[in-house]
Image: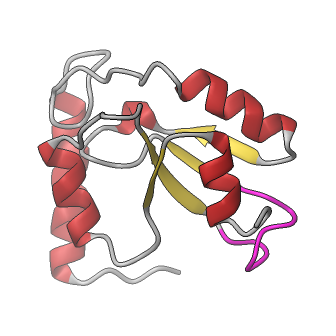
Amino acid sequence: MIVLSDREAALWQGGLDHAKKRKRGTGLHGSPRRVDKNQAQIVAELRQAGAVVTDTHTLGAGFGDIVCSHPLARPPSQNWIFEVKVHGGRLTPDEIQWSENWPGQWDVIYSAEDALRIMGVIA
């Protein structure tokens, strides 16, 4: 059983309430969720390299574009949240705010090689 503080519960409920009101095809904050041009290629290359990848870009609210794990990762069984960007791409205000408030792992990647290196699969 997961126990949430009052603040966490309020944030969670607020996010759910907001999600119910948002337009279809938009993130939790109502902004359109665009996919970076290199995301499909990165996901395909990660899967080809043995990674398990879940596309999360439609969640919005600054959450990363993909959640990824790899059987050869160091440490094993860890999940990584990656924000996919093209070179020269900028973080949105939501992405900046989310990353500043997230206590766990979160990285910006520009290629599958970046993700594999961060996960410790390649040197």
Q: Quadrant of residue 18?
A: top left
Quadrant in which the C terminus is drawn: bottom right
Q: Quadrant of residue 88?
A: top left
97 in relation to 84, above or below: below
Q: Is residue 75 magenta?
A: yes
Coloring scheme used: secondary structure
Give residue 73's position: percent from left, percent from top: 78, 68
Q: Give the overall secondary structure of the magenta segment.
A: loop
Give residue 64's position: percent from left, percent from top: 41, 48
90 in relation to 70, above or below: above
Left or right relative to 8: residue 72: right
**Residue at 23 percent of width and 74 percent of height:** 8
Give residue 91's position: percent from left, percent from top: 24, 43
Q: Quadrant of residue 47?
A: top right
| Residue 68 in view here | no
Left or right relative to 47: residue 106: left
Residues drawn in magenta: 68-78
60 in relation to 15, above or below: above
**Residue at 15 percent of width and 36 percent of height:** 29
Give residue 115's position: percent from left, percent from top: 62, 53
> Disc count in the image?
0
Q: Out of 10 and 41, give the one closest to the viewer.
A: 41
Left or right relative to 87: residue 11: left
Q: Is residue 44 magenta?
A: no
**Residue at 62 percent of width and 64 percent of height:** 118
**Residue at 32 percent of width and 80 percent of height:** 4
